Amino acid sequence: MRTTSFLKAARAAVLWCSLIGGGLCGAFAEPSGNSLEDVSVISAKSVAVDENSPTQDLGLSEVSAPSVSGVAVSGTDYMEIQPSAWEGRGLSAAEILSSLSGIQSYTQGGMGSFQTVSIRGIAARNILICIDGMPLNDASGGAVDLGAIDLNNIEKIEVYKDRVPAKFGGAGIGGAINFITKNSVRAMRNPTGRVLASYGSHHSFEGSAQVIATVKDSVQFSATASMRHSDNDYEFKNRNGTLYNDNDDFKDKRRNAQFTEYSGNVQYRMLHGGGYFSTLSGNVIHTEAGNPGTEDLQTVVAKFTGDMGQFAYRLETPEYFNHLLVETGVTGKFEKNISASYYPLDKIGFLSQNYREFGLAGYRLIPDVSANLVFGQFEAFLRVSGSAEYWESRGTLQDFEVNRYTGNLAGNIEYRFFEWFSLFAEGNILKSIDDIGGGRVLMSTGMAQVNESTDRDLNMGGLVQAKFGKQDSWFGANVSVGRFFRQPQLMELYGVYAGMLSSPSLKDESALRFSAGVYLSTPQKRSLLRATYFETHAENGIYWVTSGNLMKAFNINESCIRGVELELESRPVKMFQTVLRATFQDPREEGKNMAYKGNLLPGEPVRSYFAEGTLFLPFDLSATFQMTYRTRIFSDRLNFTRQPPVTHYHASLSWLPWDKTRLVFAVNNISDETYRNIYTPYPAPGREYKFTIIQGF
């Protein structure tokens, strides 16, 4: 459905009303004590307690974010998203992230469908996605599927737009997103927890339960278990594979798109003698879903099954010499993904009369040790880590084994020369060694062998940043420049999937990035304005080239991306808060091939907007209205596959009838926007409803 004139007028009205109400009211409203403090941190060590209490300090911190928008900001390149941004609203992780300036999202359907994001024009495959600091990016080299992340298990989301921090290894081009799971973030003397339940359109339902308990004075335990499901049987307009013939269009229903996921996490934190802390934690996800295919070729039995487990042990030492903190640990991860299809019914994959299953199983181990030194105006961080990963085939794929061993040194330093000025530098060195199992036939054609893996060069990247402004000041600014890299993943190099050809000579993708940002707030912090200019020059971009049923990865892309992010957050009066965000960018191909040079990068709009207004009503009611808009995008490098502009409207009503009870009713995609493009035939859900109850105890 294309945007009507009425919807265009409504979109403009929302933007202008929010701008006038947020900007002008913020300038003239009387003080009311409703500031937009980004985040307040209360260390457990600084809280006064009864001296006779036997409860010991577990070294935990309590973090609260009064901002109704659910986004806490430090500078212009780092943001934290709190649960208030998504709980009860029925929005996916990709939709929540794309509400931030500079971030675009892509989705192939409803709950659990494949979803990705890009940051400042840099493709999703170059974004490092982590859960509790552990990378989810796997050996396939593709983008991480955000649709598999259940936000009911997440405590907050960290977004780094300008770099991959040293604590994650520092290697990456497009920034990092870290999903932090719910754990024992509050030192409680009595057991606490909460239960969430929701039901919505397409027989979708979600359930989650969390408990935090102090087992004894020096031990704390927390656990979360979640489940979600949707039939995803929404209606859509099936164009029957014909672009210009409207006479054969008909109303259809999405089939074989059901999605079910079970997930949970657990944490056990202990205080030992001498001030040492240790933490055991684990996260698990099990997914079962149909693979519905395209709108004119819907499948019947195609499906996907995935399992992921992540377990970690961390040991924190006491502070040495009142300046040095050391932490060490080891994290293990396994994942197994299987796709299955039957060509006579599903018409996907390779022509075959057999039921086919194919997938990967991977295992990864990451030991690391890190140190943080604070001495007066000087602060330094250093992390040394290793990684060993092993991947093997599953299903009917030809047997293969690929391994990668990696060593990484990453760190940063910061020195505050004056109260209002500091310099920050960060860098990393990475070395990888690949092993492909002694020269197997890896070419899917069976016509060639890769006898040995390619030696990878030593990789180095880094960033220098100047910061201006006092801490907690009404003004701040930063300027940064850095060089970043991403080494090819195992599947991009050795192509062990059916239909993939090896490309062992692939070069590392690299980018030179620059950003400059400034933020201003009113004296009472009722209004906050941020503006950022960014520029990226990327080389050796990796793309998959398809010919018939064969695919091969090539370094064929150079690009230049320039843009500006603007953001206004204001609570001018007690009963109203508004958030406005806009991104203006020019993401262009810069390679030597004249067929692509000057074209827009796939999936990147020239402009995107986000507007949100919240009214705080009597009787503990609050109403939120949200609008997102992006200009047209292209799905291919030739700029032939064009998708029209899209506008989405969302609304939610929240009520707190009792102290620990919250009820939320949400309506998403109010305008019933479903149209994309005949060449991108993954129909989107239309208008959806959702009701949620959250009960604490």
Image (cartoon, rainbow, N blue to C red):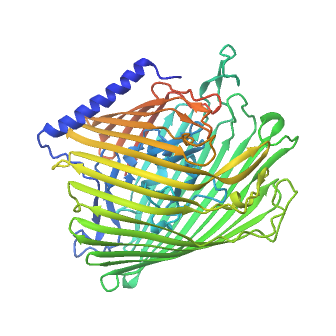
* Location of residue 271 (image quadrant): bottom left
The residue depicted at 57 percent of the width and 58 percent of the height is 136
The residue depicted at 29 percent of the width and 38 percent of the height is 578
The location of residue 49, given as percent across then percent down, is 23, 70
* Location of residue 297 (image quadrant): top right
Tell me if residue 199 can be seen. yes
Is residue 547 found left or right of 199 in the rendered image?
A: right
Q: For the image shown, how many numbered marks are present on the structure?
A: 0
Which of these two is toward me, 445 or 505? 505
Tell me if residue 150 can be seen. no
Is residue 88 found left or right of 252 in the rendered image?
A: left
Q: Is residue 45 above or below residue 287?
A: below
Which of these two is toward me, 178 or 203? 178
Q: Is residue 36 above or below residue 281?
A: above
Is residue 671 found left or right of 332 in the rendered image?
A: left
Which of these two is toward me, 690 or 487? 487
Which of these two is toward me, 205 or 340? 340
The location of residue 618, given as percent across then percent down, is 23, 33
The location of residue 48, given as percent across then percent down, is 21, 70
Q: Is residue 538 above or below residue 117?
A: below
The location of residue 199, given as percent across then percent down, is 50, 36
